[in-house]
Amino acid sequence: MQITGAEIVVRCLQEEGVEFVFGYPGGAVIEIYDAIFKQNHFRHVLVRHEQAAVHAADAYSRSSNKVGVALVTSGPGATNAVTGIATAYMDSIPLVVLSGQVSTPAIGLDAFQEVDMVGITRPCVKHNFLVKDLAELAATIKKAFYLAQSGRPGPVVVDIPKDITQQLAEFVYPATTIVRSYVPVTRGHSGQIRKAVNLLLSAQRPLIYIGGGAVQGNAADEVRELVRSLGLPCTNTLMGLGAYPGSDDHCLGMLGMHGTYEANMAMHYCDVLIAVGARFDDRVISVPEQFLAQAKKIVHIDVDPSSIAKRVKVDVPIVGDVKLVLREMLDQLKQCAELPDAGALKNWWQQIEAWRAPNSLYYAPSDTLIKPQFVVQKLYEVTGGDAIITSDVGQHQMWAAQYYHFDQPRRWINSGGLGTMGFGLPAAMGAQLANPHATVACVTGDASIQMNIQELSTCKQYHIPVKVINLNNRYLGMVRQWQELFYGNRYSETYMDALPDFVKLAEAYGHVGMRIEKPSDVEPALKEAFALKERLVFLDVITDQSENVFPMVQNGKGLNQMDLPPHMREIQQNPFENNRDYGNMC
Amino acid sequence: MRHILSILLENEAGALSRVVGLFSARGYNIDSLTVATIEDPTLSRMTIVTHGSEEVLEQITKQLNKLIEVVKVIDLNESEHIEREMMLIKVRSTGKDREEMKRMADIFRGRIIDVTDKTYTIELTGTSEKLNAFIEAIDRAVILETVRTGASGVGRGERILKI
């Protein structure tokens, strides 16, 4: 039986087992929406802006390990989706974004709502397609799902002209798809893995550096086994939080620009570093030369060869699926009679404990002003450390990353690579729909939340009971912090004058709003909010405006040259009080 | 350092723009680029002449391989190879200069493929350096226009770029 192209699109999504499509209708996709109306295999979630559709699909994927799907119309619908697509691309999230296009005869004629979507998205997708022939539609969608989730995952755009959705054809969904020019490596090279094992066994000061690849590659179990079986210290990147439990003593916390003192010092002074699905980006290693000035051997495991030796030259590159590579590494380790030098490891741990002792995340508490760090700590306690936390971008993002100790992967959902403000609320929607029984909270700020606040309306329509924790400091906090530290307190355009009354705004959208102005009210308010399981609660928390994120590694500085919080400023002058001899490290 | 990359890619709409877009987005250099389909019409072969440090070349190769439509990439500089570029150069040649120009074309094993009473159009094939040398050897003032194909290259002997 012949069916329309639009119906073929819907059938393809059914074949892929899609549960949710996040989207927004328009002229070019009206046929597809008509086909959606006539089916009941998946749910469509009508967002209020296409950017939010892609972020929601993205977080749906991050929190569930399935492919996220968004559907937008041509022209402005497509361009609105671009920020979401670029966000997913930077964090390697598997998405299939279907965009409408004007009819094939109209392409190139500056038709109404026409943009070159394939051209616009080319630099921020794993791959994209323009379907010019109905006969290729089903195979193209099949290919899109395959490409999105294999190898290094990423978003794939399928641009579908309107006339293709109207034409008739038989529906045949290919059982498999082979792309001869695309053969992602999965198993790592055994000889290279052997070299890595030998390096690890010979290490005096080993460190495991865990990135988002360990989360996306579902390698959390293997990471845990490696760290625990040898008793190694490890650190998670912003994207890797939860791959190794943040509350475990082997974990030194997050590293990088706002990482802990112990994580950054260990990263700088280790002698053997095992990078697992991490890419030495500029927010971790500001200046590669400074990082490499302290001699170390580096093993780099990544599914994407182009991530290896991009910023930092490594000694043992291993291309492959991190899960499979770590599994083979563990097998090889088991067959080895050797063990790492216990004495050296003990010394190394003593040094790490000395770095950890002053607690670089300490902040001065206050009885009168609400410290944003305090709010995240209370959020951690009230949710039992078991919530899915999404965030926007800025100071609140760093505080959430620092003070909410993620013990499981896929619980921390943020835009790490692109740094997209406006990500948090739509991401919370996607995460909640993927995990209907989970507690989902969006930690945001007064600036970020306003970049997609219209999604409160979507949350109302679909009864999405997320909790929004707005750390309201009336500033673009992270930019303000830089202006305070590096631009002589010239707060150029970072003061948010004329903020809305967020409580009334939440109420106007049909939700519960609460304002919290006293530290003593934080915990009761959080408890009250999370007790309202069926409702979206917007907590507008009025925080200390002057608070800064510490520790901090300034751009251009080494990881051993951190700006520490006030109580550690003296230590910074003399980081090696106990004068342990680690070669040239002093 | 100058490198010649040979790329086998799917002969699909948009494949060329992905390659070119990659170079501009990541700030790599393209000194010349040639592309055409090969005996298998589903494939195109591209030759890109670029320059950069070894680290940059490694990244270029990896990033090219990452493009879904790229089947294979080799850096011809890694072993012995042959390269050729073709140039059409139109020169003003009148009077006694006509004989001189004909002689120069012969010396460089060029062929005169179009003649008018005031101009010659010379077809010249060789390495890029040879074409440069020809331009250097003749009087700049007589050059009316030049058009160059950019270099194409192939590995020597048994070194074959095939699917």
Image (cartoon, coloured by chain):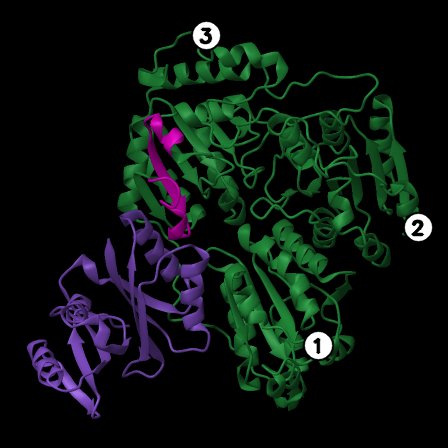
Which badge, 2 or 1, comes first in the chain's sequence?
1
Instruction: For the C terminus of chain A, give its image quadrant.
Output: top left
**Which class describes the residues within 10 Å of circle 3: few (<14), some (14-19), or many (20+)?**
few
**In which chain is the residue bearing label 2?**
A
Look at the numbered disc 1 and give the secondary structure of its residue.
helix
Look at the numbered disc 3 and give the secondary structure of its residue.
loop
| Location of residue A522 in the rendering, given as x and y in whole percent from the top left corner | 83, 27
Toward which corner of the image does residue B96 lie, by quadrant? bottom left
Furthest-top residue in this view: A578
Mark carried by residue A508: 2
Which badge, 3 or 2, comes first in the chain's sequence?
2
Same chain letter for marks 3 and 2: yes
Chain A tint as drawn: green
Same chain letter for marks 3 and 1: yes
Amino acid type at circle 3 is Glu
Furthest-front residue in this view: B95
Amino acid type at circle 2 is Ala
3D distance between C-alphas at marks 2 and 1: 31 Å
